[in-house]
Every structure is written in C-alpha cells, then in structure tokens.
Amino acid sequence: MQDLLILLIKYRNVLVFVILELITLSLVVRYNNSQREIFYGSSSLLVGNVYKQKNNFSQFVHLAEVNQSLAAENSTLRRLLSIEPQDSMKLDTFFLNGEKPLFNYRTAQVINNSVNKTKNVLTINKGAVDGIKPRMGVVDHSGLVGIVKNVGEKFSVIMSILNTNAIISCKVKDKGYFGPLSWDAKDVFTFTLNDVPNHAPISKNDTIITSGYSYIFPEGIVVGTVDSLWSVPGNDYFVIKVKLVNDLSKVEHVYPIENMNLTQLDSLKMQ
Amino acid sequence: MDSALILKSLLRALFLLTLQILVLNNILPSGAFFDYANIIIYPLLIILMPIEIEGPALMVIGFIYGMLLDFFTDSIGVHASACVFLAFVRPFVLSVVEPREGYNVNQSPLRQTFGFPWFFTYSAFMLLLHLFFYFSVEAFTFVFIIEILLKTIVSFVVSILFLQLYCIVFNPNNQ
C-alpha cells in the first residue's frame, strides 16, 4: 500500500495529466457528437451578451456594406414578385385555406462568427423565446449558412456549414443527381460533393442546389457552382469540387428556416 | 506563491482572454496561406508563470483557463486540452532551453530575466507545441494531417509576432 502511494506521488504529474486530458478529450468527443450537448457556450445569456456588446461596436463599421446587400436582396425579391405568378409559385409555397406553409422564415443577426477552425460555429441574437429550435436550417441572402445546434433563451449557436460535422444533401440543378456536400476544411469556398455516379452528364459551372431531402433546408437554395470534377480510378463516383456562392466570413443577417412538418416527418421516419 | 502574484495572474488571465476573444479571434487574415492563420497568444499565461509553479497546480490552472476560453468559442474541451498539455510539457521545454547557470528559485521565464534570444526560443517552442496539439485536438482526426501542419506553421508565424509584440508593449513581469 505504501509502495503504491509512493508510486502515485512519484508519477503524480503524469497521473494528473492523463486524468485532465481524459476529461477534456471526452468533452471534445461529446462536442463532436454535437446533437446532445450538455454545455451551452455562447448560447448562454452571459456569453451571448458579451458577444452582443462586441457586435454593437463592429456592426457600425459594416453598416454601408450591409445596407448594400439588403438593397440588392430587396431588388431581387421585387423582381421575383413581378414575374408571372405561375413561374414563381411552386407547389411548396402554394397553400389552400387553413393549410400552413411548409417552411417559415425568421430573421436574426450574427453576433459571433468563426471560419478558421475545422469545426466552425456562429452565434445569433435569437433564441427559444423567438421561436428558434434545434435543427432549423439557416441561410443568408445568397446561400447556406448552417444548422441550429444549441438554443439558449435569447441566443443560439449555429453549426456553420464550414464544419467537418456538417453534411448537407445537395443536387445538381436540372439534372437531379444528388449527394452529400461536405467542407474540405481548407478555405471558406471549397466544398466536395460525393456519391454522384460518374456517368452523370455534369460539367464545370453547373449550379448546385439543396435537395430538400434532409428536411432541414427547403429544396432549391443555390449553394454553389461546380469548380472541377474527376473520378477516382476504380470508383464509380465523381469527386465534385464545389465553389460556394456566399462568403461566410462576411455573413451578418441570416434567416433561420423552420420546417413546419418536422415532427410529423420525424415520427414517420421512426416507424 | 504570494497573493500579489495570484492577483497579477488573475488580471493577466482576464486581459489575455479578453484580447483573444474580442480582438484576435476576429482578425481573419485571408489570401494564399493566410486562410489557415489563427492568431493565438492566450498561452502566454502558462508561458509566463513563475518556474516554481509546475505539475498538477499548473495543469489545473491550464484546465480552468482553457475551459473559460472554450465557453466563448463553443469548442468545449479543445482549448482546455491544449492548455493542460502545455502545462505538462513546460518543465521539459524549460530543461531543453536551460541557460548554463541554471534557474534560481523564484525566477520567472521572462525577457527581462534571461534576455530576448532566450525568451524568443522558449516562447517559440511552447507556442509551436501548443498550436500543434490544439489543431490536432480540434480536428480530432489525423485525416487532416496536412491541414493541421499547415495551420500550425502559418498560425505559428503570425502568432509569435503578436506574442513578442505583446511582451514588448505590455512588458509583463511577475513582481
């Protein structure tokens, strides 16, 4: 017993190191699983408020830029309105009396953002009291932003699409081939679309849109364009490099999207 | 460890965290290799601790310090893990760069005490080890080993400049 004690004291450095590393690494594993998170981080009131104060400062600097992009978005929406109704009206947005729309858009502001890690997250200034729920998709005026991960009372954390855990079901516009889109963890624009068979007639600059199969994003949001593609010998699938349309390092105003039928779709899936 | 030093370290921790979270994390250099750059100077708290503080005490300090940062960056465990590692390897780094006269009790690894060349070598070693461990844990797989190495090297070059600049501007000491 005494020997053991002496041994423990002798190697206490290594012992404490191993114990603390086990604690931190198990937390990292939990964080990597991301769905059942026990910590709140920046969706908590304390941390969220710090970032909100910071954002009050930095927002001011970008006002001109933001105004410009909002004006551009307004003009796009106006143009959409002026198009013949049968062109712009999809089945998705057409609903009869008493029927609810399939997707509901909300607005939020990004108060904290990161793009230079392998698992990036954003914080927005809306939380449970504003109707934000986990697993809502988040887009900005031109493309995808991420998926809501943690919801606090007044703030929420979004898993950015610049996160190696984020995989989004996408397809090639007008050609129908679909596959999972994931980030390369290199720069903020380069993504890879996998699982598209290599007989598909896909060429450079084809548009990649969301497929809508995951229930998180509605179908048809423009994600990016095909930058390059090749097939690995002995493999029946293309490796398609996709260039993102939006710059996630500049995102400020975002729109969380709620799938109104999510619970029903989930319970169907469970059966 | 007297109370003045504890107070000083607490204030330094608070200041470094504020600087890291509100300023440095928002500087995103871009273009060519700089897409990989993270400006990281918060390990200075552990780097500058008096030499006599080591072992479990320093590791626990690193753990708490890293966790505080993790809460703000939504990366629970990642910074803490790297800080514990840095606290663990510090005695080894110190023995590698030990000056010929050795260390005295009560000394701190500062530029004022051992001169700039020594401090630069020591802090560079520490920062490099910290960054490599940090990016490895962050990716949590060696599939991205090229990215991890690139990030480590590019971030190191940028961070060491900021770190030395911090030491020159604020002239931190433990008295």
Image (tube, coloured by chain):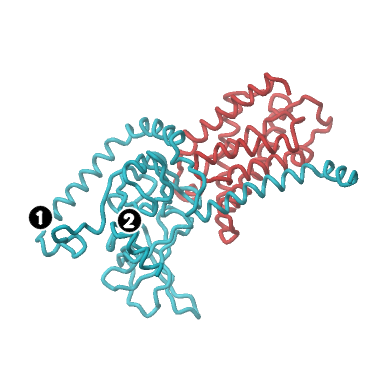
Chain colours: A cyan, B red
Closer to viewer: mark 1 or mark 2: 1
- Residue indicated by mark 1: A82
Q: Is residue B102 left or right of residue A113?
A: right
Residue toward you, A37 or A160: A37
Q: Nearer the viewer, residue B143 or A232?
A: B143
How far from the left and from the top, in percent, is residue B87? 70, 39
Front-lying residue, B62 or A243: B62
Asked if both marks, 1 and 2, belong to the same chain, the answer given is yes
Question: At 33% across and 68% down in the image, what residue appears?
Answer: A171
- Residue B91 position in % (x across, y down): 76, 38
**Residue at point 26% right, 56% down?**
A103
State the CA–CA distance, disc 1 to disc 2: 24 Å
Subunit ID for the residue under disc 1: A
List the residue tagged with mark 2: A245
Are there few (<14), some (14-19), or many (20+) residues within 10 Å of tag 2? some
- Dividing the picture into quadrants, the one containing residue A45 is top left
Q: Chain of mark 2?
A: A
Residue A211, by quadrant, is bottom left
Q: Is residue B133 above or below residue B143?
A: above
Relative height, residue A138 to residue B44 (above, below): below
> Would residue A95 appear left or right of B144 to someone viewing this image?
left
Q: Amino acid at mark 2?
A: Val
Label 1 neighbour load within 10 Å: few <14, some 14-19, many 20+? few
> For the residue labelled by badge 1, is the local secondary structure a helix, a strand or a loop?
helix
- Numbered disc 2: secondary structure: loop
Q: Quadrant of the N terminus of chain B?
A: top right
Residue A100 on image: x %, y %: 21, 57
> In which quadrant is the C terminus of chain B drawn?
top right
Disc 1 marks which amino acid? Ser
* Label located before the other in sequence (1 or 2): 1
